[in-house]
Image (spheres, grey):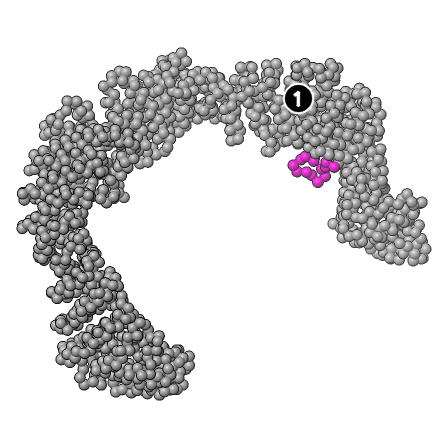
Amino acid sequence: MVVSDPSRLVLTLLPYLFLTDVKVKQARQLASSSFAAQNPILSGLKDTAWGSIVFGKERSKLSWKNVVLADRELVEHLCCQLQSMEPAARHDIVQAFLTTASGSMERQMPLKYLVISVLCRLISQLEDERERLDLALSVTSQLRSLLKDASLAPDESADVATVESSFLQTLHDLKKSVFPVSALGSFVADISEACKIPESLKRCFWWESAVLMPAEQKCIALLRELFDLLTTYANEGAGMHVFRSLTQQLFKHHFTDKSLLFAFLSYIWTSSSPYERMQATDAITAVNQIRALHIAAAILRSAAQADLIAIMSLSSDVLPSLVVAMASPLQPVRYSALQCLHTIQTNCKHGNFSYSSVVDAICLRSDEVLADKNHLAQLLGSLFDSDATSPAKKRAGSRSEREMRGKALSSLLLCVNNDAVPSFVKERLLWCLSLVSSTDVLVQLKPLMASLLQVVDGSVDHIQHQLKCLQFILSRFTADRVSVFATHPDFGGLFLEALLRYRCSDPDTNSPQLMALNQLSKEMFSAVCVPSMQQSIISSLFDILLDCKNADTANKVRQVFKNISLDANQIAVEMEKLTQLYCSPAGSTIRDMKKHAKRATRSKAATIEDASAMETDRAPGTEVRIDDRAWQRVVHILEAIQQKKKLKNTQALIPALFTLLSKCLEMEASPAVEYAKQLLLSCIRHVCVHLSPQHAPVDPAVLDVQQFNVELIVDCVRGSSNPLTHRHALVLLTDAAQMFPEHVLRNIMSIFTFMGGSILHMEDNYSFQVVISTVQTVIPAMVKATERRNAEDVHSMITSIMRVFVDAFPHVPSHRKLPLFITLINTVDSKRHLWTVLALLLELHVTKTAAELPEWHDKTSLHPDIEFCLELFENFPPAIQVESVCSMLAYLQEMPEDKPKDNKMATPMKKQKTGHLETTEHLFNIEHHTAKQLRHFKFVAVNFISILLSCPAFIGQVINLSVPAAEAMKPMYQLQLEKILGYISLLARTSQNNVQKPSAKFWKALLHKAYDILEKTNSLLPSAVFLSVVEGLMRSEQLSIRRKSMELLNTRLQAQLQQQQRFFTEEQTPVLLELVAELLAVVQADVTSQEYVVNKHTALFSLKLLCKALGSEHPQQFTKVLHVVSCIISEEGVNLTVQSSALLCLGELCSSLKVHAITHLSKFLPGVFAVLENREKLLSNNLLLLSSVTCLHKVVDSLPHFLSPYMVDIVHRAVELSGIDQAADTHKSQLHVRLKSLRSNLATLVAPRVLLPAVSQCYTNLKDRQSVQPLMSIVSGCIAAMSKDDLAANQQQIVALFLNCLDYRTQHKQESVEALAGTEGHVVDAVVSMVMKLSEQTFRPMFFQLYDWATKHESSRSRVLTFYNLANSVADKLKGLFVLFAGHLVINVATMLESNNSSTADDLFFDGDANATELRRLLLGYVLDCLHKCFLYDSQGFVNKERFETLLLPLVNQLENTDGDDEMYKEHVNRHLVPCLTQFAVAAGDDALWKQLNYQILLKMRHSLAIVRLSALNVVEQFTIVLGEDYMNLLPETLPFLAELMEDESFEIEQRCQQVIQHMEKVLGEPLQKYF
């Protein structure tokens, strides 16, 4: 814009034109400038009165009077210039002025004052009202900001004598950046002049809802802003009295009439702005309301009584507005309003005004109203409650008072119904009257309700307040007021209209529909006395459900249906609206209707535009589709009532529901049709449950059974493929079977057949529960019904039903099978029919599922079918399981042996008079199965029984039985034994008859399984019964039965001996002892057949177990057994297995009888030794070998102190057998363990005085070296077990034995060096074990004796080798203690080193021996190792100077000992010599000795042989490592030798020397290359 930039520049220059002091030089220069002449605002300024004053005299200063006049003229000039401009240009400059006025710089205070003065002056001169009001509002806003931010100067106008002085004071304040309060008066006066209250506002009381023009609205806004501005600063700040005076002027100028003033003030205190969610920036605040109420109270206090009566008249709205203020949630507002009422009550003392009763009541309870924001509604409710009929309330006041209260209430209601009243005021008044229970109030609010229903769904301002008004009205429709539906029918229409008003402009407020639904309580609906109104409400609710798209609303409608109490006839009426659209020929059957539906042509349904015209869309008889509005409405009805509890006369729904169900069956299948069927079935069941909660038969007077169409329900099952429909139908049939059993019976089998073919395949929990419920309810009802007809048909019917479930077994989900069959069996009586289900399952397994194994199944485990049967049996008591096993065994006995070739029923194996097979032949129909399947069925059945009896779950159940239950099981055990024994006899005969047939193996296997059953059955028997049964079986003529009885006995005895379970008590001991004679009879039988041999073996094992259990307490009964067993062992040609069992039995007899067997030692031990002498027989039969060793071990363990005559033989056999065991290398076998235990017993249990001579004699008689180690282990064990006294007493004998054993190398020179070393090592270990138990005093003479034994016999140098081997081992064990004795060896050691050095000795050891070199190396190794240990563990100065010099050269010269090949030399040096020399240096511990040793080693570096030089170099390297930095003293003499080796002719030595030097550098931390 053109003037935008000049306007900003003018604003910058105006402070220089506005004079604040007497200096005018700058003002003159600016006014005379060309800019001022060209600027539209400043042009002509010099020619005005301002110019006359400023330029009048040629002085640089003016008088203060002229300053005041010049500033006033400047304001007038600027105002005239702005007024003369075009509106657009003026608007831009004004906006620039306003921007300047809103600036925050305090130094511009004179400019702000000038700008506001110009704008206020301009307001009074503008002709356009709208522009004038806009400018006034803007200037007011700027004044507010200025008053808020700037500092105010105190008002001193009262002290100023003239206007000139006042203005001079103003200039003085502006220069101090303080705004003068005195200047506000003229500003507010100018602004107030711009505001003229319109005539339309003067004629109405409620300004907020008045229809106003924009200018009138701005006038109200300006008045509101002025009121806020003046009242804000009238109570605080420096110029309070100025603002109060201005406030009074404002009221006097604009509100000459009190009614107009109260209209303005009520506009302030009834405003909803303080309570809005989003307040506008110019909104009325609660503080404004409080100020307005305070002003009203002041006015009321000063008003005359006549004026007060006029203000409080019924035609006045002052009191309603005050009631709204008292309903404020803000306590200060309520307090201010109460002050007004108190003023009215005080000034109108006689109470002769219309609202006196209201005012008095509120003032009386003012404290409660002030404290509780909700108390006002309670107060008015009790005040205006005119429906009370109690005498107490009638006495509450006179008739005139009640009439006055009624008029006051009517006046308030007229105010509510007044269209001119704002919505917020209506809302507050309705809230205040919300607790008035009078029906008349609801009647008087009917016009308001009608008008609100027309506007609530439109875009109307303050819609939330209108909705709340409607909510207050609808909330009055309670149970005690709905009688208005009868007295005022229009209310019914309004309520229904509210139910259908689902639209709402305010998303945060409930729609009228939800408000009405919230009022539909159980009590309210029941109180509606007009049946048509109830029906209309129900119909409207269903329409809402049909048309509703809001989930919350739909849920609310359903909740309403759930709570209200309905009559089924009302629901039937709604359903019949659909049936009226059908026109089926009378008497048509369902089948005819289905055929008609298939032949009918279907037309496309037209779109339904009007949702309310359901019945008129189609003519009766036309085709109705499931997606039509009529059917959808019925679906919603069914959804609403399927769980409805508060429903009367429910039987009235049955005909309508079955009619609708028949219509569904006529339609083509679709998801919608299936859903409708499910709803109908669910509703029918709900009616049935409602009629008979316990499913008892229904009285025909209540519901005719013919109305319950079972055929339709069955058709739903048959004609539908939807699983959910099946479930609903089956659940309904389950209930119907109990309520109408005879009516359902004829369709029952088709239902179960359908279940087996479809619903049993479902995996969901609901389907399973449906099946379970059907089984538990339908089957008992059918059993009772069948028993009434013919009791003999019950078993056949139950079997047929169970076959249906068994046939569906493969398709039933795995996790559902077990619960299903448990429920089925419990329902039909598990005691009678558990075995029937088992037979059917096994038949299914044999014929269909046996070969159908999943890929993941482990073939070594049980088939899933068998596992399921086991799990099934586990869920029933043991008594029922045993009884089922007996029934199954009986059924197997009655089955034919094989399938006849003529396909006729063969004669059963065993025909009973009861005809058991005839009643159960349909379980496994032989005519329909092959012979192979028959045999398979028998085998699977017997195998299952065997598995069941050994199942841990079944055994656990039997063990945990209570005492009475266990006693009750005895007859069942007896019966089971009889059945299995009878079946075994039958199978034995059949097996003998089929020996030559291909099926022989089958019968043998089946018999074996039957024996398993017998064995497992016996394990369940009580001990007393078990013993009597075993005793009887042992007398059987069949050898297999005898053997089986003994095996059963052995099983129990073993379990008891192993403490797994105690079968036999002391009371049963005599019975067990009686069995000894029976078992001896079996053992002594003179028959050699294979079966007899097996029986003898079993009998001997039984005797062994009995002896172990009872022999120690009853030795007399087993003495004869000992004699018999001794004879069997000594008998020639006896079977090896029997002989092995006899040996084991003999060992157990000795272990049990102990001293009672001493007299028989001479009888049985020779036989045992004879068996042990036959080496070939022992090696050929491991059982015999192990049995003989076990027997010998038991004898030694039991009778160690009575075996002196036999000790040599015993030791010899033990050592010889141990040698065999070592040769076979069976260290983990039982034989090895037994032999080791035998040797241990000999060493620890036999007295040394008896054992040592036997050992010595045994060593003398040894035939192979493998026996030395076992023999020495016996000696070691004996020494370890000896006490100190025994050791001292037997030391000489032991030493003599060891000297003999240590001479083994001399006595067996023909053996290899390795073999001799190994054998000698065992002897050395034994000697060391003795040494470790000796003290120093006892060991020293023994050591010297051994030294003399080795060194004083020149003829046997092998002893020296043995001695140093022993010395090395002893040194290794004694460590530092051996040093005490080693000094005796030093000279001999030096001699040995020299005598066996090929470089120094002429006569070497072992010359002439084939292995001389190996022996010398071995001897030197023992010597050097022994020295190394002495040096290593030397802590007492063993290596002194004398010994050092003695050993120095012999040790160093060993570097030149090249005896043997290079590999032997390297091994000797690296393994023995180098460690010895190194530790020798460490033990010396003296620099002088080190130098001697080091120098002697260095001399070897000049040896002619490269291998010697290399070894010396290795020794130097080790010295460096061991001595570390101490080697620095030896380095000077070492370097020349190393330098020589660096130039050695051998490349290997030169390279190795470099490595050694590098290593020495690392160890010593000093570079050595500089010396070379």
Query: Is residue 395 placed above or below 1294 in the rendered structure?
Result: above
Instruction: Report the front residue among 617 and 1413.
Output: 1413
Q: Which residues are magenta?
A: 273-287
The residue that mark 1 highlights is: 436
Q: Quadrant of residue 1334?
A: bottom left
Residue 980 lies, in percent from the top left, at 17, 32
**453 left or right of 195 in image:** left
Element carrying mark 1 = loop
Mark yes or no: residue 1127 visible.
yes
Going by the picture, which residue comes out furthest to the top? 701
Residue at coordinates 37% horizontally, 78% vertically from top-left? 1523
Query: Is residue 1497 placed above or below 961 in the rendered structure?
Result: below
Mark yes or no: residue 260 visible.
no
Instruction: Report the front residue among 966 and 951.
Output: 966
Residue 880 lies, in percent from the top left, at 26, 29
**347 left or right of 1215 in image:** right
What secondary structure predominates along the stretch shown in magenta? Answer: loop
Query: Is residue 1395 placed above or below 678 in the rendered structure?
Result: below
Q: Amino acid at mark 1?
A: Val
